[in-house]
Image (cartoon, rainbow, N blue to C red):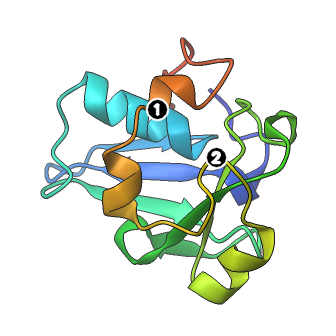
Amino acid sequence: MAISERRYAAELAEQDGTVYKFDDIACMLRFAHAHAKEASTARFYVTDYRTGKDWIDARQSYFVKLATSVSSPMASGLVAFRNTNDAAHVSTKPLGSPITFDQLWAQDMNAMSTNASNTQPRR
C-alpha cells in the first residue's frame, strides 16, 4: 500500500529490522494486534499531524480523532501530535481529550474505520 498522505503515516519496526509502513495509524495498530506484535518490544512511529513531516515515537505522542473520518486515507480520522496542546486544539469525539499510545493500544481499532478490513502494510 502506498503512503498517500504523509501526515497520517505510521511505521512499525520490529527488533529484527523489519519495517512495516502504513498510511493510517489505525491500520498499523490493527496489523500489530492481528499479528501478535508486542507493544513493549516493537517500535511504533507516527507522523506529527501539525507539521505533516516529522516522525515521532508513538509512545511519546498524543492522539485524537478528527471531526470527520473521511479526511484520512483509510477513514479512521486518527491523527498524532508531538504535544498535548496541539492535539487538544483538534480533539473531537469519540476519543474526546487527547490520549496516549497506551490508551490507544487498548482500544478496538476495528471500530475505528469503515475500511477496517484493509490492514496490509507496505514494506
Where is residue 36 drawn, in percent x and y?
Answer: 17, 30
Residue 83 visible from this viewpoint: no
- Give the residue drawn at x 48%, y 73%: 61
Q: Along the horizontal axis of the image, is 74 left or right of 59?
A: right
- Give the residue drawn at x 55%, y 71%: 55
Quarter of the image that includes the N terminus = top right
**Tag on residue 85?**
none
Q: Which residue is mark 1?
A: 109
Q: Which residue is mark 2?
A: 94
Residue 16 visible from this viewpoint: yes
Under mark 1, the amino acid is: Met
Instruction: Name the residue nearer the viewer: 101 or 67.
Output: 67
Q: Along the horizontal axis of the image, is 17 left or right of 2?
A: left
Quarter of the image that includes the C terminus = top left
Under mark 2, the amino acid is: Pro
Q: Earlier in the sequence, mark 2 or mark 1?
A: 2
Q: Find numbered disc 1 in the image and state the secondary structure of the residue it sits on.
A: helix
Where is residue 92 drawn, in percent x and y?
Answer: 74, 57
Q: Along the horizontal axis of the image, is 42 left or right of 74?
A: left
Above or below — where is 71 with respect to 55? Answer: above
Q: Find numbered disc 2 in the image and state the secondary structure of the residue it sits on.
A: loop
Where is residue 5 drawn, in percent x and y?
Answer: 79, 48
Above or below — where is 95 with respect to 62? Answer: above
- Give the residue drawn at x 42%, y 67%: 100
Instruction: Name the residue nearer the viewer: 89 or 12.
Output: 89
Using a 10 Å C-alpha cutoff, classify the residue at mark 2 as few (fewer than 14 neighbours), some (14 to 19) or many (20 or more): few
Above or below — where is 85 with respect to 16? Answer: below
